[in-house]
Image (spheres, coloured by chain):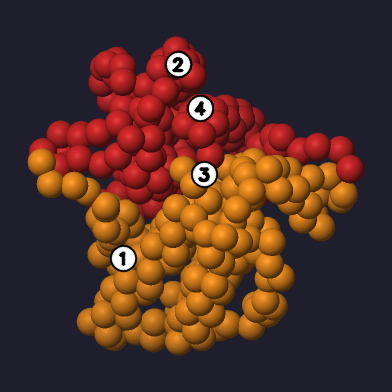
Chain colours: A red, B orange
Amino acid sequence: MTHEDALGLLAKMLENLERWMDKAEEDAKARSFDVDVLAQARLAPDQFNFCGQVQGACDQAKYAAAYLGDKQAPSHPDTERTFPELRSRIAKCREFVGTVSAADLSGSEQRRVSPPWLGGQWLTGDDYLAHVALPNFFFHVTTAYAILRHNGVALGKMDYVGSLPAHAA
Amino acid sequence: MTHEDALGLLAKMLENLERWMDKAEEDAKARSFDVDVLAQARLAPDQFNFCGQVQGACDQAKYAAAYLGDKQAPSHPDTERTFPELRSRIAKCREFVGTVSAADLSGSEQRRVSPPWLGGQWLTGDDYLAHVALPNFFFHVTTAYAILRHNGVALGKMDYVGSLPAHAA
């Protein structure tokens, strides 16, 4: 999987997340509650709420694009509290990911990636993608999905997976 | 990310899942309940329980290895109901994934993958990995993790991520 394809996958999953939020809004309207109750919902008292999961997914995509594309990641403070604010955060993230070109990603497999939390240690770009970006990104989008499902939003596996680049028989 | 590295990532996450199960067993002992209550736990009434999530994760890893390595996937019926049975399922899955060699994966990026549920359509091996295997695999392991967290098992992000192939500064 090329890193360009990997960033495309993250962008697609963020689009899917927006569709899950559409369904959450429809559900909140149908059941007559404020959808931002779901923005504060969480699965365990010491785990991030839905806002935190969306922010985490965005940050994983943003940092993957920045580290692999050798660009400065824009600052996106975690101030969102509502669905419209979360949608804006996702849009800003997707916009930044879209600025990273195939040329920016040239040689990214072997690029040294040294996020501050590694305390000076480093990973190859390819290992950062496989062992940090992808697991953590999918952790956050799946937990966001699980929070909605746990609260009764009618989502299914095809909402999760989204479109597939399938070829005709 | 090479397909060999991708299968290694799936195997590592299955090992991590076994560590989460260790912690669930310790927690059940400390709180004096039968750990297999957690095997039946779920986040929504119409979503798979913990057993189903572990079976799903194993199947995604198994089919990724089989399709990309051009091998016949062994049959693993979803009969598990207990933690020991789930551990056996994970072990069988990891063993099969381990049989797929780098040579088996030669050319797998462009190999046509046509699972029955695609109704005759096909994906390239690389697209199958990116758009089917990875999202669905991480869906199931993250949901398994979320079921344990929701029920009070003390897991944290480092349990989720596991070991990192980091290099010294």
Expressed as whole percent of the image width and height from the top left, the position of residue A148 reads 52, 44
Question: Mark 4 and mark 2: span between their CA atoms?
Answer: 10 Å
- Who is closer to the viewer here, B56 or A86? B56
Q: Nearer the viewer, mark 1 or mark 3?
A: 3
- Who is closer to the viewer here, B5 or B50? B5
Comes first in the chain, label 4 or label 2: 4
Comes first in the chain, label 2 or label 3: 2
- Who is closer to the viewer here, A159 or B169? B169
Question: Mark 3 and mark 4: span between their CA atoms?
Answer: 25 Å
For disc 2, the neighbor class at 10 Å (few under 14, some 14 to 19, many from 20) is few
Q: For the residues tagged 4 and 2, is the chain the same?
A: yes
Mark 2 residue type: Ala
Question: Mark 1 and mark 2: span between their CA atoms?
Answer: 46 Å
Expressed as whole percent of the image width and height from the top left, the position of residue B98 reads 50, 71
Question: Mark 2 and mark 3: span between their CA atoms?
Answer: 33 Å
Question: Mark 1 and mark 3: span between their CA atoms?
Answer: 20 Å
Q: Can residue B134 be seen in the rendering of this structure?
A: yes
Expressed as whole percent of the image width and height from the top left, the position of residue A131 reads 35, 48
Q: Quadrant of residue B160?
A: bottom left
Q: Are marks 1 and 4 in contact (CB under 8 Å)?
A: no
Q: Secondary structure at mark 2?
A: loop
Q: Residue at x 44, y 59 (%)?
A: B8
Mark 1 residue type: Gly
Expressed as whole percent of the image width and height from the top left, the position of residue B135 reads 55, 47
Residue B152 numbered mark, or none: 1
For disc 2, the chain is A
- Who is closer to the viewer here, B51 or A111? A111
Label 4 sits on residue: A4
Residue A145 numbered mark, or none: 3
Report how many numbered discs are placed on residues in the image: 4
Q: Nearer the viewer, mark 1 or mark 4?
A: 4
